[in-house]
Amino acid sequence: MSNQFDFETYLSISPNKIGIYLFDKNKLINLYFKEQNFKNNNNFIDFNLLNEFLENNIFKIEKLIGRFIKNITLILDSENILTLDIGLQKKNYEKIITQKFLENSLTELKDLINKNYQDYKIMHMHIINYLFDRRHSSEFEDGVICKNLSIEIQFILVPNKLILEIDKILVNFQIKSKNYLNQNYIQSLFKDQKISLSEMAYKSQKGYNTNEVSIIPKNLKKLGFFEKFFQLFS
């Protein structure tokens, strides 16, 4: 098999379906995937079924790639996931809006969310709209002369308790969850494209939504603005 960095392993979990995907990042295809649908009379995730599903598939993937899976990205669908739409208005005393001004404003808001939702983890944080004084824009414009900047931001939060329950099962396979994606959110980004869930997840992590603050490894040589910005959160 190719280098371990050529692959990404995704695990999708919802009350009625579980899926696992070994995704080739170069060819953008699944080298292995298995999905299981099951009847569920409530909206809770069945962790016993999750454990059984992993027992049936983890070894097959590890045998295919010739090594152990150490990390996995979770794609979650749960009624306990929170979506918050928040508006932020900041007065700019320097007249010109800079990236640094935006960074400070978003960091302040992110810290406020973490303080008020301590039982949750931020999965996604993305900007929906900017208002430079009275002018709307879907993109940030560095160097704009503006007295007031208003930003409409959406946060998607997952309960820490849910992550802990899943991690308890993953540790049985010596696997750690490293990233968390909301299934409904990433599917909304690609609603007009016929691509696999794993490809949606991969492309969303690579910055498909240019207004999302994404988790990006710090060792990348070239980073976009929001990739650099997220390092403030690490």
Image (tube, rainbow, N blue to C red):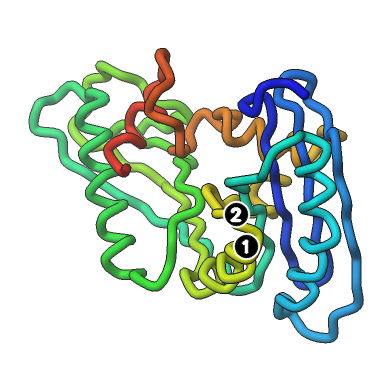
Quarter that holds the N terminus = top right
- Residue 201 screen position, x and y as percent: 67, 40
Left or right of residue 107: residue 71: right
Quarter that holds the C terminus = top left
Left or right of residue 84: residue 202: right
Q: Looking at the picture, tell me which residue is in the foreground, 165 or 56.
A: 56
Which is more N-terminal, label 2 or label 1? 1
Give yes or no for contact between labels 1 and 2 (Cβ–Cβ under 8 Å): yes
Three-letter code for the amino acid on which mark 1 is drawn? Leu
Q: Looking at the picture, tell me which residue is in the foreground, 224 or 169.
A: 169
Secondary structure beneath disc 2?
A: loop
The circle on residue 175 is 2
**Residue annotated with mark 1:** 170
**Vertical order, 25 against 143 (above or below):** below
Q: Farthest residue toward the bottom?
A: 41
Q: Farthest residue toward the left?
A: 93
- Residue 24 screen position, x and y as percent: 76, 28
Left or right of residue 197: residue 208: left
Q: Looking at the picture, tell me which residue is in the foreground, 224 or 171.
A: 171
Label 1, label 2: how far apart the Cα atoms are:
5 Å
The circle on residue 4 is none
- State whether residue 1 appears in this view: yes
Q: Looking at the picture, tell me which residue is in the foreground, 186 or 69.
A: 69
